[in-house]
Image: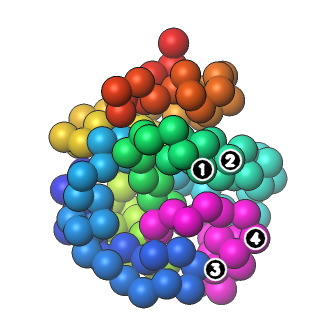
């Protein structure tokens, strides 16, 4: 969580930068989404995550998703975000924070979604199962993402 809070995060595909500490202030659940446009399973899962994210926000869950790209270029990342993403934050392409997060959360393949609590502890390492396994209204209880 320290890596995210100390990093400048991008607001959407064409948005400006905002301090991670500011952007994540007050969020009870933070999803870190490791993905890339060139990855077919990612392209299948991303729209599902977008719908899940929007439904959780509408239900009052204090959630934010931060995209960590494995795209080959900033242009590829921007195109992917414009095409399929929600209004998520993103670690800028090529930022050292991206590799730090991949290492910290032991990401060995994509797509990977890790949910964190506000204090930075891992709430769910297999966030894809949460998203695919149940409707969003059952996934966020008292601003804690849960699988069961």
Could you give the CA–CA distance between mark 1 and mark 2, rounded to whole angstroms? 5 Å
Q: What's the distance in space between the residues labelled 1 and 4, CA to CA? A: 16 Å
Say which element carries label 2.
helix
Up/down of 137 relative to 35, above or below:
above
Q: Tell me what residue is drawn at x 54 percent, y 46 percent.
A: 58
Is residue 9 shown left or right of residue 37?
left
Q: Are marks 2 and 4 in contact (CB under 8 Å)?
A: no
Residue beneath label 3, please? 78
Q: Are marks 1 and 2 in contact (CB under 8 Å)?
A: yes
Residue 145 image offset from top left, x and y in percent:
43, 29
Estimate the x, y position of residue 23 in percent, counting from the top left. Answer: 30, 66
Residue located at (24% from left, 52% from top): 26
Q: Position of residue 101 (x, y in %)?
A: 36, 55
Q: Earlier in the sequence, mark 1 or mark 4?
A: 1
Task: Point out which mark residue 130 bears.
Answer: none
Q: Earlier in the sequence, mark 2 or mark 3?
A: 2
Residue ID for mark 2: 51
On the picture, is 47 further left or further right than 96?
right
Q: Residue furthest top?
A: 148
Sooner in the amino-acid sequence: mark 3 or mark 4: 3
Residue range of the region highlighted in magenta in the rendering: 69-90
Helix, strand or loop status at disc 4: helix
Q: Is residue 81 magenta?
A: yes
Mark 3 and mark 4 residues within 8 Å of each other at the beta carbon: no
Q: CA distance from mark 3 to mark 1?
A: 20 Å
Tell me the crowding category of disc 4: few under 14, some 14 to 19, or many 20 or more residues within 10 angstroms, Cα based: some
Q: Nearer the viewer, residue 95 or 15?
A: 15
Classify mark 1: helix, strand or loop. helix
Between disc 2 and disc 4, whose residue precedes?
2
Identify the residue position indicated by label 1 in the image. Answer: 54
The disc placed on residue 83 is: 4
């Amino acid at each position: 969580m320290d890596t995210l809070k100390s990093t400048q995060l991008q607001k959407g595909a064409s948005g400006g930068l905002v301090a991670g500490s500011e952007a994540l202030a007050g969020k009870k659940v933070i999803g870190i989404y490791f993905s890339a446009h060139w990855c077919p399973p990612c392209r299948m899962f991303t729209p599902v995550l977008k719908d899940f994210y929007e439904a959780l926000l509408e239900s009052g869950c204090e959630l934010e998703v931060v995209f960590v790209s494995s795209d080959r270029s900033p242009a590829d990342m921007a195109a992917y975000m414009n095409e399929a993403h929600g209004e998520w934050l993103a670690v800028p392409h090529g930022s050292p924070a991206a590799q730090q997060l991949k290492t910290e959360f032991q990401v060995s393949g994509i797509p990977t979604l890790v949910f964190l609590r506000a204090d930075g502890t891992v709430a769910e390492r297999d966030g894809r199962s949460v998203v695919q396994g149940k409707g969003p209204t059952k996934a966020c209880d008292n601003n804690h993402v849960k699988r069961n």
